[in-house]
Image (tube, rainbow, N blue to C red):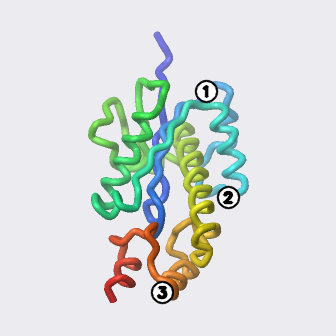
Amino acid sequence: MINKIFAGVDEVGRGCLAGPVVSCALILKKSISKKVLRDSKTISFKNRIEIAKHIKKNSWYAIGAASVDEIDKYNIFNATLLSMERAVKKLKKKPHFFLVDGTHAPKKLKNSKTVIKGDQKIKCISAASIVAKAYRDLYMIKLGSKFPKYKWHKNFGYGTSQHLSALKKFGVTSYHRRSYKPVHNILFK
């Protein structure tokens, strides 16, 4: 009997006010150190970046994203599924089965199972979560260098008090999600 190959799929950035939603599809290689794999939200930024480097060297992975325009056009739920589809499609090595964090998987994704809190329970989903979060965090830091007043290098686009204060003071950028209530309210007050 052949060993089944599993891919973990997870997304990050659903709750942000700015930037894309990013997903990762990932298959672990045997060389991975599994002891470092856990929910990305429990790992500090600095450690997450280092662990993501280790994971990328010891896995097959692909990143997919949905833009701010797609989030505003399709809503965050559908944009998240779109980002997952894109990650899965780009994955060079094809698994037998996909394990997707949460309650919904893309409809086009055959041979999949959703796992609530999968990023806490299943190593390949934890790894996908870490790689996606590191990728998105670094993207937001780079983007934040163009918009330093919003402190994206610290809040990564989430609705922190600093970010909300900057939104009220400096207005909305093209990277803000206009369909999200705090942004929408500033645009249409």
Give the residue number, with chain letter if any, for mark 2: 45
Residue bearing mark 3: 168
Residue sitting at x 72%, y 47%:
50
Residues at discs 3 and 1 in contact (Cβ within 8 Å): no
Q: Which mark is residue 178?
A: none
Tell me how far mark 2 sits from mark 1, CA to CA: 24 Å
Query: Which kind of residue does numbered mark 3 sit on?
Result: Lys
Name above or below for residue 14 compared with residue 24. below
Instruction: Say whether disc 2 or disc 1 marks the residue closer to the N-terminus.
Output: 1
Q: Amino acid at mark 2?
A: Phe
The tag earlier along the polypeptide, 3 or 1, is 1
Residue holding disc 1 = 29
Residue 181, position in %: x, y? 36, 77
Up-down: is 97 above or below 12?
above
Query: Residue at 68% of width from left, 58% of height from top?
Result: 44
Spatial CA distance of label 3 from label 1 is 47 Å
Q: Is residue 75 left or right of residue 95?
A: left
Q: Estimate the x, y position of residue 114 in percent, counting from the top left.
A: 38, 42
Which residue lies at the image location 40% right of the left edge and 77% below the top edge?
183
Of pointers 2 and 3, the one earlier in the residue sequence: 2
In this orientation, which residue lies closer to the viewer: 157 or 160? 157
| Amino acid type, label 1 | Lys
Task: Rate crowding at label 3 as few (under 14), some (14 to 19) or many (20 or more) other CA atoms within 10 Å.
Answer: some
Q: CA distance from mark 2 to mark 3?
A: 27 Å
152 relative to 104, above or below: below
Question: Residue 40 vs residue 100: left or right?
Answer: right
Q: Secondary structure at mark 2?
A: helix
Q: Secondary structure at mark 1?
A: loop
Mark 3 against mark 1, which lies toward the viewer? 3
Q: Secondary structure at mark 3?
A: helix
Tell me the crowding category of disc 1: few under 14, some 14 to 19, or many 20 or more residues within 10 angstroms, Cα based: some
What is the crowding at mark 2: few (fewer than 14 residues within 10 Å), some, or many (at least 20)? some
